[in-house]
């Protein structure tokens, strides 16, 4: 007997979560559950507003069509699927077929998207060497540069990952780096896409010596990852990238070129974060993943993140959006 079920969740967010242009007050998504011959596989489908190409409604309709095909023993055309749908279904199938290992990579780089004092408190409890991530580009470039410089100055064993989300012009990026002590630049592990075009970002790296990480570029048609002394890492956000196989291909390509593949979240629930931790441990065990986003939520879902005190909502409390058995 084969069955497939889609649960819909709505989780309240912390009041300070801001995407590109809007404040995110709730996170919507789906958990799919596959049952076959006593085995269970689950995955999360959660398009990220302003970043995903598909809406929640489009993802749900497509997921139902694909799951119906699975129940009918029909092949899945992975290339035709939205990234979030491809990822969630592929992970559920990997669990069902016992391909996805249980062990997870739960050590993460703490995230600072606002008050740097909160990050300093987290860093005080971390062993050395310390790695953290700072969102830049949301405030004035000068302010960002001063904050990054302060963190590197106060915590001598700190390495920072920075993420600008293509917010700066080359001129603005120059203003940012002007406020960072040149002797601290080597402790910036990478800066994700500082400028509005890849060409400007490369020009920034050549001028400053600060290495880049590609993020948005991975999702653009025609992008080719090449060995480049200016590129230290790629940031792989599976919900925005696609199937588990696609994620594996990016990781393998990065390893071939000596580039770090960083498995990172797209604001998935604690359920999805736990699966991402398992994927990170499986595919990129030597690289610290970017999964410190559970504290941006007000609640967890089904599986708690280690040592997270937020209340946990069981999947059974979620709405069943669709369920069907094999004919």
Image (cartoon, grey):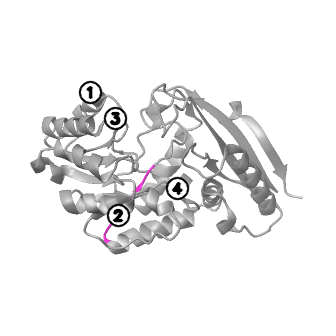
> Which stretch is magenta?
258-264
Secondary structure of the residue carrying numbered label 1: helix
Q: Is residue 140 left or right of residue 37?
A: left
What x and y, as percent, mark residue 217? 44, 61
Separation of marks 1 and 4 at Cα, in angstroms: 30 Å
Of residues 20 and 103, the one nearer the viewer is 20
> Which residue sits furthest right?
327
What x and y, as percent, mark residue 202? 30, 63
Secondary structure of the residue carrying numbered label 2: helix
Residue highlighted by disc 1? 117
Separation of marks 3 and 1 at Cα, in angstroms: 16 Å
Badge nearest the viewer, 1 or 2: 2
Badge nearest the viewer, 4 or 3: 3
- N-terminal of the two: label 4 or label 3? 3
Q: Residue at x 23, y 44 (%)?
A: 175
Q: Residue at x 32, y 43 (%)?
A: 133
Separation of marks 4 and 3 at Cα, in angstroms: 27 Å
- N-terminal of the two: label 2 or label 3? 3
Secondary structure of the residue carrying numbered label 3: loop
Res 139 label: 3
What x and y, as percent, mark residue 296? 46, 32
């Amino acid at each position: 007997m084969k069955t497939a079920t889609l649960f819909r969740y709505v989780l309240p967010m912390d009041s300070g979560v801001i995407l590109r242009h809007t404040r995110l007050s709730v996170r919507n998504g789906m958990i799919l559950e596959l049952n076959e011959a006593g085995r269970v596989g689950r995955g999360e489908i959660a398009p990220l507003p302003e970043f995903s190409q598909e809406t929640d409604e489009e993802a749900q309709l497509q997921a139902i069509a694909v799951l119906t095909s699975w129940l009918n023993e029909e092949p899945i055309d992975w290339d035709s699927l939205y990234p979030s749908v491809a990822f969630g279904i592929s992970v559920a199938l990997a669990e069902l077929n016992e391909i996805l290992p249980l062990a997870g990579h739960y050590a993460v780089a703490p995230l600072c998207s606002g008050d740097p004092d909160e990050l300093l408190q987290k860093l005080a409890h971390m062993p050395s060497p310390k790695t953290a991530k700072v969102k830049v580009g949301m405030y004035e470039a000068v302010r960002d540069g001063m904050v990054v410089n302060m963190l590197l100055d106060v915590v001598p064993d700190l390495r920072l990952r920075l993420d600008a989300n293509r917010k700066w012009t080359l001129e603005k990026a120059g203003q940012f780096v002007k406020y960072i002590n040149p002797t601290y630049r080597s402790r910036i592990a990478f800066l994700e896409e500082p400028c509005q075009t890849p060409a400007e970002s490369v020009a920034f790296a050549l001028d400053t010596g600060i290495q880049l990480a590609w993020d948005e570029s991975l999702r653009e048609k025609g992008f080719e990852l090449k060995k480049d002394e200016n590129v230290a890492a790629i940031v792989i956000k599976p919900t925005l990238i696609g199937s588990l196989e696609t994620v594996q291909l990016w990781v393998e390509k990065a390893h071939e070129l000596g580039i770090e593949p960083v498995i990172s979240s797209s604001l998935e629930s604690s359920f999805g974060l736990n699966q991402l931790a398992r994927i990170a441990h499986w595919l990129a065990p030597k690289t610290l993943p970017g999964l410190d986003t559970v504290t941006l939520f007000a609640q967890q879902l089904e599986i708690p993140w280690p040592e997270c005190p937020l209340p946990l909502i069981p999947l059974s409390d979620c709405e069943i959006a669709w369920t069907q058995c094999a004919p």
